[in-house]
Image: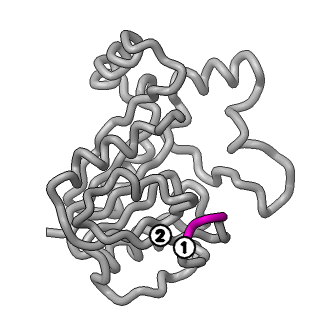
Amino acid sequence: MWIDQKFVVIEKILKNENGSLLDLGARDQILKKFLPEKISYTGVDISEIKNSNNIILDLNQKLKFDNESFDFVTALDVAEHLDDPKTFLRECLRVSKKKVFIVLPNVAYYEFRFHFLFKGNLGSKYHFSGDNKDDRHKWFTNFYLVKNFFDKNSVNFEIKKVIKQRNKLKLLFYLENYLAKFFPNFFSWSFLMTINKN
């Protein structure tokens, strides 16, 4: 089974940590498998997922947790689906004590560009069906837009480039990892924002 590199990146960051973690948009709780045993896990999602014990919440609404209820808060590929990412960010910061991790996709990634050039669309998350319940992205995100958003709405954050590993030769993965340092808008699959509360 292919695992998105974002989970590996967060595993490395949290490997020596302990405390509590709130996973917003947890789906089938894949992140939990990458966390050390000393971190207690709470998953939240908008709908029930088979074989998970997620708390059901609409993330477009205020989070029903007290201030600083969790040491860590994650929102991996979630904010781009929401109506009001600014309020969502403030809520993530409110309920966390130490760090917030937010992953956003890079629509300017070269594979998306080629897909649009040759097939006329950016993939299944960007379409025009008119159905309000579709699992779709509401925001166009790339390196410069993401950086600008966090510059305006957060303090003390770090951007980490996440490189796509699926269907890649190892050499191509390492090449993209190197090129993303110079051309993040073209070679980064997504971006991990780490916001430190301290």
In this rendering, would 152 be left or right of 84? Answer: left
> Taking 168 as reference, is 102 above or below it?
below
> Taking 163 as reference, is 51 above or below it?
below
User: Where residue 15 is drawn, which disc sits there?
Assistant: none
Give, as a single range, the part of the protein colored magenta: 50-54
Q: Nearer the viewer, residue 149 or 93?
A: 93
Depth check, mark 2 against mark 1: the one in front is 1
Total number of numbered discs in the rendering = 2
Q: Is residue 27 magenta?
A: no
The quadrant holding residue 45 is: bottom right
Residue 54, x across and y down, in percent: 54, 72
Which residue is at 86% across, 55% downward?
130
Residue 179, x across and y down, in percent: 33, 17
Residue type of the residue flagged with mark 2: Gly
Looking at the rendered image, the quarter that the C terminus falls into is bottom left
Is there CB contact under 8 Å for labels 2 and 1? yes
Which residue is at 34% across, 57% downward?
101
Q: Nearer the viewer, residue 197 or 185?
A: 197
Q: Is residue 51 magenta?
A: yes
Q: Earlier in the sequence, mark 2 or mark 1?
A: 2
The quadrant holding residue 154 is: bottom left
What is the chief secondary structure element of the magenta stretch?
loop
Which residue is at 54% across, 20% downward?
167
Residue type of the residue flagged with mark 1: Asn
| Residue that numbered label 2 is attached to | 43
- Identity of the residue furthest to the right in this view: 130
In this rendering, would 106 be left or right of 156? Answer: right
The secondary element bearing badge 2 is classed as: strand
Residue 136, x across and y down, in percent: 69, 51
User: Where residue 53 is drawn, which disc sits there?
Assistant: 1
